[in-house]
Image (cartoon, helix red, strand yellow):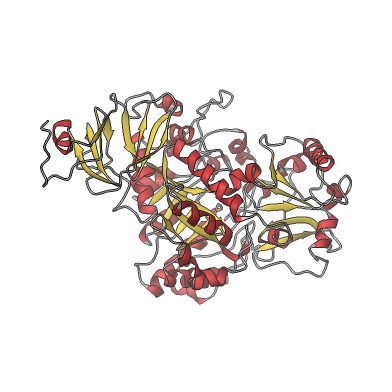
Amino acid sequence: MSTREDSSVNYADKIYRNGNIYTVNKEQPWAKAIAVRSDKIIAVGDEEAVMRFQGLNTQVLDLKEAFVMPGIHDMHCHPDWALAGEFSYFNFWPQFPQSVSEMKDKIVALDQQLDKDDWIYVGPINPFAFQQEGIGMDSDWLDSFVPDRKIAIIDNGHHTLLTNSKTVALAGITKDTLDPSNGVICRFEDGRPNGLFQEGAQTLIKAIMPEVPVSDFIKMFARGAALLHAQGITSAKFLHLNTPRLKALRELDRQSQLNLKIEASISWKDDVVCVPDRWELMAGARFEYMTDHINTNSVKFYLDGIPPNRTTFEKTQFNIGAELPRIKGNQFEVDEHNHDHGEEDLAHSCCLSGGFGVVNFTFRELCAMVADMDRRGIRVIAHAIGDQASHWFVSAVELARRDNGPSGPRHQIAHSNSILNKDIKRARDANMLIEFSPQMWWPSQVTSALWRLYDKDKADRYWPFREAEDEQAHYCFGSDWPVHGLQWWNAIEAMVTRTNPVDPEFDYPMGENMGLSVEEAIYALTMRGAYAMENENKTGSLEEGKDADFIVLDQNLLTIDQSEIHNTVVKLTVFEGREVYKDEAGL
C-alpha cells in the first residue's frame, strides 16, 4: 500500500486476517478478517474489505485459518473460593476425601503442623461419607481428636460448616441461641448445638475467624482472571462478595490487571461471607466500587440448599434409603399441607403449595426483598436448585413486575437444576434469566448419585436447557467454579452430547434429549451471556462497533466431531483489543 495515509480513514491498530471467524451475528455469521482500533471492532468481513483499514502502524496477524469466536461468558463463579487455599490460611483438599478416616487423617496432620493458636480452616468435607459410614457429622467426632483447636471445615459449595465444641463456645453459641432467619444451627437431642451449621448460620462461626486482608483477595482475583482468560472467558459474574472483595476488584481494575467484564454480586443476608455493612452497600456505598468493567448492582443469596444434604426445596419427597435418614430442615421447612402464603399469590393466581426440604426465606420475606431490590435497580440472583425453590422465586419476581413495572433488572435463577417447564415459560415472560450451573450435565459419580435422591426421570431431566431453548427463554451458563472445576471445554461438549467427555466408566447418556446443537451452545455462551450481563449491545457477537472481545481456538467447533470438543485448546484471548492470554505454543 502507499506510504501515505488518508486522514479520513480510521486505521486499525491490529488486523487479524486469514481466519475462520464465527461472528455469532446472524446477518453475517462468517468472516475472514477483523480490524481492531483501541478497544473496538471497526471492521469484520472478507480480507479485501478489512485490509483497507491497514495503516502504516497497523499490526497484521495471520490467524492461519484458526477458528475465532466471541469470548465466553461465565455467569456463575467464585475465584476467591477457588484460590483461597493458595493465597490465604484456608487449606484446600484438592482430592475430594472418600472416607471419614481420610478426613480425620488430614485434620490430625494439620493439627500437628500448625501453632496451637492457629485456626484449622479446611475443606471440602464429604457429607456422603458420614452418611454411608453411619458416623455422626458433628462436634463429638471432632472433639474426639482435636478438642482444643479452633477449627472450621466447610463443604465444597459453602452450604455447611462443621466445628468442635471449643469453637462453638468461643462464638458464644449455646442451647439458647436462636437460629438465624436464613440458616440452621443443628442440635443434639437435648438442644445443644452439635457443631454443624447450615446455610447462613455458618456466619456465626465465620464472624470470629481471622479476616483475610484485601491484599490477599487482590492476589486471588488476579490469578483467577488469568485462569479464566486461559479458558476463553472475557465476561463473568463473581458471586457472594463483600466490601474487602469489592475493594480488591476495584484496585485490580485500576491497575488494568482484571481484564474482564464483571458483575460483582454482593452476598445477601450474610449467608456465605460476612457483610456487616450490607445495608450501607444497598443504600449506595456499592457505587464506590463501580468502574467501566465492574457492575455492583447485584445481590446473591441461597434460597435453598444442596442435594447431598437433602436441603433443596422440592415439590416431591426425596427417595430415602435405609442408609440415608431424613434430615430435618430449618424453621421454614414446609410440607404438602402448608398452602398459606398470603393474599399476594392468590391475587396472582399462583399455586404455591408446600414442598419438601429446606427453604431459607418465608414467601412473604422473599417477595418483599425481591420487590425492594427490583425498585432499586439491583439484580437478584437466587440459588434455587429444587423445583419448588425456582417456583417460589419466579412467583416473587412476577409480583415485583406487577407492582414495579416490567422494566426492572433481569433477575437470575442460579443453577435451575430441576426448574419445571411451566416455570421456564413464566420466567421467560417475566424477563428472568435461567442460569444452568454447574458443569455436571453428564453422568459421573456425583450425578449418578442423583438417582438415589430422585426418580430417574427427574434426574435425567436435570438442567433442562433443551426445554429452555425450545421455549425461547433467556438462559445462560455458569461454571460454579470451584464447586465444580474450571473445565469449560468438557462442559461445552456435554452441553451437546449429555455424555461424560473423559471417563469411560460412565459410558451412557444422561438426559440425552436435553442437549443443544453446537451452534445453540455457542450462542448461549456468547450472546445469551451478554444478555445476562445486560451488555448485549457491547459484547456477545463480533460486529462493527462492539468491544473486541474474542478468542482463537485450535479447532473449528462446527466441523469437528462432537466427541472432540473437550480437547479444544484456547490459543489466544483478546479483551477489548488487548491480548490477555496467549498459549505457549502460539497460533
Give left or right: position of 137 versus 206. Answer: right
**Numbered label tally:** 0
In the rendered image, the vertical position of residue 498 relative to residue 216, given as above or below? above
Residue, x 39% and y 53% (percent of image)? 532
Quarter of the picture containing the C terminus is: top left
Q: Quadrant of residue 202?
A: bottom right
Q: Evaluate whether residue 194 shows in this view.
A: yes
* Residue 367 seen in render: no
Q: How far across and down, in percent of the image, does residue 465 sit?
A: 43, 44
Please say if 328 is above or below 480: below
Q: Nearer the viewer, residue 112 or 194?
A: 112
Determine the residue positioned at 79% across, 39% down. Answer: 100
Residue occupying the point 42% across, 55% down: 433
Residue toward you, 494 or 421: 494
Looking at the rendered image, the quarter that the N terminus falls into is top left
Q: Where residue 85 sits in the image (x, y, percent)?
A: 65, 43
Q: Locate residue 43, reporting x and y percent.
A: 20, 41
The percent position of residue 76, horizontal first and vertical second, equals 49, 49
Farthest residue, direction bottom:
343
Q: Is residue 550 above or below residue 149?
A: above
Residue closest to the eye, 211 or 440: 211
Task: Describe residue 141's horizontal placement relative to residue 196 as left or right.
Answer: right
> In which quarter of the view is residue 358 placed?
bottom right
